[in-house]
Structures are given as structure tokens and as C-alpha cells.
Amino acid sequence: MKRRFAFFAILGLAACAYGKVDLVTLPVRDAVQLTIYNSADLTLARERRTLTFAEGANALQFSWANTLSDPTSLEMLPRGHAAEIDIAELVFPPRTRNLGLWNINSEVSGKVPVEISYLTSGLSWRAFYMGTLAPDEKTMRLQAYVRVTNNSGEDYENAQVRLIVGKVHLLDEIAQLARRPHAYGSPIQRVGDDWLAGRAVKKELEVRLNLEYDAMAVCDAPMDAKQIIKEGLSEYFLYTIEGTETIPNGYSKRLLSFEVDDVPVVNLYKFEEDQYGAEVVRFLSFANDADHELGETPIPGGVLKAYRRVDDQRHLSYVGESAFKYIPVGEDVELNFGPVRDVVVEPTLMNFATDNYRFDRKGNVAGWDEQRTFEVKVRNTRDVPIQVEIRRNFETSYWTLTQGNDIGAFETVDVDTVKFTLTLPARSQKTFEYTLTTYEGTRREAWKRLAR
Amino acid sequence: MNGKRLILLAIVVLLAVAPMASARIKLVALPERAATVIRLDNPNATLIEEERVLTLQKGLNKVDFSWKGVQIDEDSIRLDVLDHPEGVNLLSVSYPPDEAALVWEISSGGNYAETVRISYLLRNIDRLITYKAIADKAETQVGLRSYLVLRNFSGEDFEKARVLLDYGEAFEQGIDHEETKRMLFLKAPKVPIRKIWTFDAAQLPWDPERLENQNVGIPVSYRIVNDAASGLGQFAMWGGKARIFQDDGHESTIFLGEDNAPLVPVGEKMELYIGDSRDIVVTQRKMKDTRINLRKNDAGRIVLYDTDELITAKIENFKDSPATLTMIQHIEGQWDMKKCNLECKRKDASTLEFEIELPARTEEGPAVKELSMHYHRRNVRTR
């Protein structure tokens, strides 16, 4: 294991004699816990070590190299004899980097377990999913994975790995804090240096992306499934991976988060010219609830690659992929697979008329009605049943709508949008009609009465 | 202390009153600092007070105060005579050309070992305040710690100084040039908090369905009151970065988020924004927006009208715990509320604030509340 964190204890010193380090012990980590966030380049590292204290003043030096850890987050907490150990101060000595020195007064001598925590960067995780649709597309086998990547510069051996789902508010990037020449910055303003620091960050990010890409190609071997314990805390979900993991620097690990065999799904197709243009967009819809064999925890956002089982020999057809957002327990999921051509929605203007003209005192036109009759043809050319949602947007809030037949009952979405929902069996077609009346000029004054 | 002495004090004793020599003579005695105070009560400037003993002779004395490699506001330099204020008079202060120095001309009524206090504003030495709060699992209270961070980039080493803030006891601390020290100075183990979710209709998107693959995060804050009931309230809490953690129930913590705490006077509230909730979803829509009560000019053109507007908001709590959502709605101009199904507080002429209690989700699904605001905007002029 590459050791990049070093711990020195200087015992029995009254003052900070960091120029003349008297090395007494170099204690190893007893345990490491990594809590990795996915909304920011942020990991809370917590290590336990057993230190040997002398009665009186102790100076403990903690240093690191080749990692991007935030020195301002460095904390030490005695896990024993807490009342007898006073952590007086943390000193960042002059003309040193990546080094903190604790001055500690101890009323005990001997071994004391301590916990050291800090925020570091370079560890990341993401969720991704594989969905396998049944031939009838009524159910889907859903496999959820998490992938943890270590580009921190440190090898973490036998670490307890915890993953946080949620959006954390950060004022500064940890990596930027780590790169500052002085732990808490300096009151001296240096505009030019900030610009240089910005350039350095960009370069570093480029390197990291490359590393991750390489690791993906080399290290994506399937792992034995481990249980992941999930629990809610504040606005976050905490995933704790069973046991411990060793993730060397530069490596990624993929772990199965959960697997559900038969999630009922709806083939949902949407048509809305304002949002998607003239194309029909395919969605796969389900809910994160018990009715869909889910609903125990929120589902972290990620990308789902969907396949369809096409025969009894377990051959697959690739349907596509869809990114989706974080899904709370109980909320519907709509996976967007993009525009399709095998479901067609064709709205056609069949008739246009104007009526109810009003004139002002000078004889000019002051108000009128416009009537448009649309015929909407919906064709399902697929061999599975589907649901189609058609939204029609109007450019005015003064409108009334009448339907020409029973097909496609509509509901009002908002002031200028209505929604028709249709269910179509395999290889079928439906046609519905509606007449939209819009009220212009002074005819809007009559709209309130007419709209009732 | 590394032995650098960058602020120098020298005494030239002039026994006869004579015009100042063009080439200045320096260094008769170099008195050591007796006591130094670093005063950090002003966040914009740091005042140094140092006491030195000057050996003054009866008559006119010149005291040369010079510095190098440090930035002193020379207009801020003061000299106070402590032992014989009646017998020792500061006559003048002169600034030699092209030098970081000044010369005090002091008249002494006797031969004194006079203690003087020299004070000046020194740049690039300051203090920061940081906070660390650990919330309990139920998020009802936090253990609050505040740290003082001393940063000395002034160019001067302070071997031992008394450090003074605007409250609390002074403490002794040495700090070298380019050194940073962090010290605990406030510990409040059980500070009650209130967790607040806020939806501001002017700040957040109304309809999450219109956003492709994006959650609308509802900002979440902790509210802390700086008063005695919170175990605080003895002094104003300085502004600084606050990092908030939460006890995870497994002898460990998770990091919840961080925010810049403002200065909080005694009795006032501090709100720390920690992150966004994606388990409360607000879908707000305008369901009606029409013109009514039209008033026209002689040409029949509408010049004044009222509006008939209906806004609905569906609030869903997907969390397994209850929450109180603060919802802020804005109606500009002159308006009348015709019907509103939830109680609200009018914050100002155009702002309404709703406190909406949301139960936890059930097995049937999320807890849902709906807001419906039917209002008229009055006397809107046609442009």
C-alpha cells in the first residue's frame, strides 16, 4: 500500500518545535471509513488510530502528499479519555504545506484511540442501471449498480465505504481548498494567482477524466454481490456497503445495489409540439412504489440502458438508454428513450371558420371567434399495447374545446394546455376529433360566460 | 520566534535644540517590546498595541520608529506615554523622505525610563471564524463549536501577544509570520434548531414536468437563535463558514453541507442553508389568467382592466417524516384575494407566506396538499 498520509507524534514538548521533529511513533490506521458524495467531488474520510500520549504537552503532526485534502476540515477527536485530553490548537506552521500540527495537553499517558476526520477529493461514485424488458414489454427486470472510483491519490485498504445520495451545498470545491498554499488562505490579495489556480484546476480535471476512462476499460470486472444497507438521514440517503473494500488509487469498483425481477412498466408515448416538436417520444413509465416491487428507498439519478428479451434463447435487443433524475419513494419514473417512428400522431386541421364578429362605433372589427377543427390520428405499429399522451398547446387563455367523439377524453393541464390520453392495442389505430374555439378582441368579454 | 525584527525603534537623544541634521543619525538604544496586544475586534483592520520602555533624558529626545517588510498604516501610528504623562510631551511627528519610518520629537521633564504604548494598524494579520455543527439524528438540536483562526501574513513574528476579540477573555498566543492557528473558542452542546424547507415561487421552477431529468431541489435550512434558551446569547456571533454534520446513529457522522453564516446579533436568528430536498415536490400552475372589468376610451380601446387569475400548487411530500414547507408567493401591483384555501401571512404588499404542514408519506403514496389562490389584480393599465 502506498502510504501518503503520515502521522508523527512528538511527545512532551511545551511549544511547537516543528523545525526539529522528534519522531516517536508512526501509528497505522486501525480502521478507515469513506463517505463518498455524488453531487460534488467530496468525501468525508474518517480514520481511527491508536496514539501514545505522554502526560503533559504533546505535539502531533499529520501530513499528507499527493492527495487533495482540505486542511481546514482536519479534526481530531479522542475516542477514549475524552475529558482528560485537551486539544488546544491546530497549527499550520509557516512555509509548509499539507501539514497540520496539533498541540494537545494530556492528563493521561499511554495509548488512546483517536478519530481523525477530513474532507478529501478524488473519490466518486455514480449509479447506473440495466433494464431488461419482457417480450410483451409489460414487465422489466431492473438491476441497479453503483460504481465507486478512486482517483484520490491514496490507496484505501479495507475501508468501510458509504455512499451519499443527495445534493449537498458547498461554498468551495474541496480540491481548490486543498491546492491553496495556506490552509485558510491569506489576507493578502493576489488576483493573478487565482487566475493561475483556475487554469491548474482545469488541467487536473482533464487528467482525471482520462484516468476514469482508462479505468473503465480495464477494471470493469463483475464483483461478487454484496449487500448494500440503505437508510435515510436528513435530506440524504446513506448507502453502506457491507464489509470493507480495498480500492487502490486509479481503480473503480462496481457493486450491485438492488435487483428486481418483474417491475410492471407502461409503454408511454408522448406528443407535444411545444416541447418535442412534431415527433413522438417514447417513455417507459413505472413508479418507485410497492406496487412496482420497489419503493423501499429513493432511486438515485443515473443512466438506464434498456434491453428487450426477444426470444426463448435469452437473446436481447438493445432498446436505448435514458438518463433520469433522483426518484423519491412513491414518485413516478418516466424514462425518455427519445423520438420514435413506430408510433405516429398526426394532428390535421380539418376546418377553419370565424364567427360572431363585433364592430366598434366606427365600423371596424372589434371582436370575433375562431373555430378550428382538428382530426388527430394515432397509429401504433408495434406488436405490443401502448399508452399515448397527446398535449395540445394554445396561444391564448381564452378558449373552449368540444370533442367530436368519445375517444381521447381530455383534461386541462394549465391555462393554455390540454392533455388527451389514449390506450392502443398492438398494431391498431385510433382517430379523434376536437374543435377549438378561441375568442379574440371584445369577444373575450363573452368568454367567461361561454367557458362555463 | 525566528529572530527577525522587522519593526524597529531607536532613540536619538538630542541634548541641544538644533535644526534636524540632513543625514539622520539612528540607533542609540533599541528597546525590546514589553507587552504586545493584537486587537481583532474590528473585522476590517487589526490594531497592534505594544509597550516599550524608552530611556528618556531631560530635554529633547527623538525617537525613530521604522519598519521593513510589513505594511503599517502610518497615519494610524500613535504613541501614548504611560508613566509620566504630565512630564513627557510629544512635540511633533516627522516622516523622513523615502523611508518607512517616522520620528517622534519628545520633550522630557526628567531622566525617565518611560513606558510608552505604541499602537498602529498592521495589515495582513487577521482572524476568521468557522463553525462546526453536529445535528442529532432527529434534527432537533446541534452541538455547535466555533473556532477562531488566526492568520499572520504581516511579515512580523509575534513571540507572545495578548489576543483580544470584541468579547470574551483575552488570551496569550504567539504566532509567527505565515503561520495559521485554529483554536476552539465557543462550545454549545445543545443548541435547538428548526429545520425549514422553502419554496419561493419567484426563485424556483413551477412545473417539474417541464424539466427533463432535473429535480427541483427545495432549499433546506437550519434556523438557530442566538439567545440564552439556545445556550448562546452572550455576544454577537461573527460571520464565517459553517460546516454542518449529522450524527448517523452508528458512532459516525455524515456531512450535510456548508454555508456562510452572517454576523448574528444577540436575539437574532441565523439560517444556514445546507442543501436541497428532492423529496418534497411542488408543481405550480396558472390555471386561469383573463381580463375582466374592462374600461375603454372613446375609441373603444381598453385602457384599464382587472384580471381574474387562478394559481394552483400541488405539494407532495415523499419523505417518511413530516415537514413544514414555507411557501412564498408573489402578486405584483394592486390586488384582491377572492379565495385562498390555505392561511397565509402577508409579508409585504406583494409577498405572501404560507406555512404548510406536510404529513409523512403513507403506504398509499406521498402526502399531498394543494394550494389554490384565486385573485384579481386591479386597475391594470394597458400599455
Image: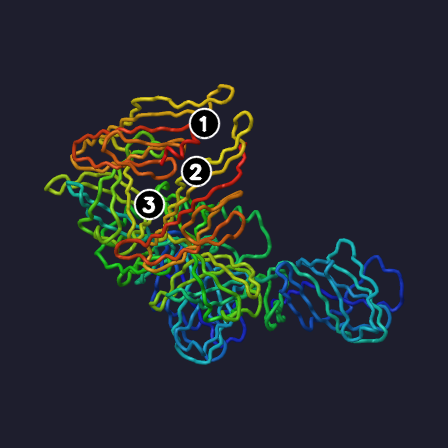
The nearer-to-camera label among 3 and 2 is 2
Across and down, in percent, residue B139 comes to 40, 64
User: Residue sitting at 75 percent across and 56 percent down?
Assistant: B99
Q: Is residue A70 left or right of residue A333?
A: right
Evaluate whether residue A162 shows in this view: no
Across and down, in percent, residue A2 comes to 36, 60
* Vertical side of B289 occupied by B136: above or below: below
Amino acid type, residue under disc 2 in the picture: Asp
Q: CA distance from mark 1 to mark 2?
A: 15 Å
Residue occupied by mark 1: A441
Amino acid type, residue under disc 1 in the picture: Gly
The nearer-to-camera label among 1 and 2 is 1
Q: CA distance from mark 3 to mark 2?
A: 52 Å
Instruction: Work out whether disc 3 and disc 1 sit on a shared chain.
Output: yes
Amino acid type, residue under disc 3 in the picture: Tyr
Instruction: Work out whether disc 1 and disc 2 sit on a shared chain.
Output: no
Residue occupied by mark 2: B289
| Mark 2 crowdedness (10 Å alpha carbons): few <14, some 14-19, many ≥20 | some
Residue occupied by mark 3: A213
> Relative to the observer, which residue lies in front, A15 or B229?
B229
Q: CA distance from mark 3 to mark 1?
A: 61 Å
